[in-house]
Structure formats: C-alpha cells, structure tokens
Image (spheres, helix red, strand yellow):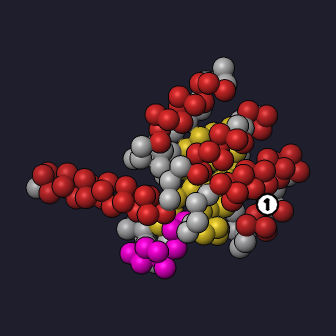
C-alpha cells in the first residue's frame, strides 16, 4: 500500500498503533546503524533511505530525477516489509539468510530484496540494524553500476 504521506513522520503517524510502534522501532534502528551519506525521505510511498543526487548525480536509472533507492520500510496490507537493495543483486543475501537461521526457527519470508514480517513480534530489530550497517553509499553505488553494466551486456548479446 503506497502512502501519500509527505514526510516520514506523517507516514508513521498515519499507521495503526500496533504497526506504528514496529515501524518507529525499525526506523530508529536503521537510522542508528545506517552509514553516513544516505538520506531519509519518502520514497515510492514508503519510508526510504536513498543515495542523494549530491553523492550520485545520475540518480535511479529508471527515473533519473529520483535519488538512487537503497532501503525502504513499508506497512503493507498483510505485513511489514523491509526492502534492501543490497540483498537484491548484492552480496548480503547469503550473510542475511545465514544470520536469520541463527536467531529464528521460523522460515524466512523473503522475496528478491524484500523481507516480510506478518507478525511484528518476529521482526529481528538487531539483525535489521546490522544489515543496515553493512554497506556504505559508495559500496552500493559500485554494486549498482556493476549490475547495470551486466544488464547492458546482456541486452547487447541479445541483439
């Protein structure tokens, strides 16, 4: 569910109380652990942490006027989600799944870059904080550009 909130505070204040507490705690742990250089803003109707144009003027290749997305938090209809681009196309997927197994007997509910938590009690705040700390904006830019080049080479090979 995309929100029309204009600020992160507006987004959080629009949530039901039980989700509000979980999203506030996620926001807090991410902001505490996120390396310097990322900026918090509303991004795609969610709380977003992006690489600002000041660090990466090219922006997001699909929509260059937008900053490069990195991490989002969203209160969806049936779950709370953490979207982390370092899991999708990045080196953190193996690390995260291994760490998850150490702390939870539950099956990890995850897409390519989305971690879903149907039960707020299952959110591993400390692990999410560690995940947020694992990649600097410069490291994310390098991975992003390498993946763009791979995509370009695949496109050229098809021709």
Could you say where residue 66 lies in the image, as x and y percent from the top left?
A: 49, 73
Answer left or right for 104 relative to 98.
right
- The quadrant in which residue 139 appears is bottom left
Image height check: is 21 above or below 57? above
Q: Is residue 78 above or below residue 73?
A: above
Q: Is residue 76 visible?
A: no
Circle 1 packing at 10 Å, graded few (<14), some (14-19), many (20+), is many
Instruction: Residue 86 in the image: state x and y as whole percent.
Output: 47, 49
Q: Residue 149 colored magenta?
A: no
Q: Is residue 42 left or right of residue 86?
A: right
Position of the N terminus by quadrant: bottom right
Left or right placement of residue 143 versus residue 4 in this view: left
Residue 112 coordinates in the image, percent (x, y): 47, 41
Q: Which residue is pictured at 61% across the width and 57% down the height?
A: 34
Task: Please give the residue where the numbered disc 1 appears in the rendered image.
Answer: 12
Q: Which residues are magenta?
A: 50-58
- Residue drawn at (70%, 41%) of the image: 126
Residue furthest out toward the top: 105
Seen at 73% across and 67% down, the residue is: 8
Q: Nearer the viewer, residue 67 or 133?
A: 133
The secondary structure making up most of the magenta span is: loop
Res 57 → quadrant: bottom left
Label 1 SS? helix
Which residue lies most toward the right here?
17
Name the spot of residue 12 as percent of width and height, x first.
79, 60
């Amino acid at each position: 569910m995309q929100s029309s909130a204009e600020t992160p505070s507006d987004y959080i204040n629009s949530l039901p109380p039980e989700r509000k507490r979980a999203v506030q705690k996620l926001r807090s742990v991410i902001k505490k652990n996120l390396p310097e250089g990322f900026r918090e803003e509303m991004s795609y109707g969610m709380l977003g942490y992006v690489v600002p144009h000041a660090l990466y003027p090219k922006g997001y290749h699909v929509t260059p006027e937008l900053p490069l997305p990195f991490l989002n938090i969203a209160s969806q209809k049936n779950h709370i989600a953490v979207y982390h681009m370092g899991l999708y196309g990045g080196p953190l997927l193996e690390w995260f799944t291994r760490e998850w197994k150490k702390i939870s007997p539950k099956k990890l509910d995850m897409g390519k870059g989305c971690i879903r938590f149907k039960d707020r009690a299952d959110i591993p705040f400390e692990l999410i904080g560690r995940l947020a700390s694992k990649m600097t904006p410069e490291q994310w830019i390098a991975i992003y550009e390498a993946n763009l080049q791979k995509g370009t080479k695949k496109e050229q090979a098809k021709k």
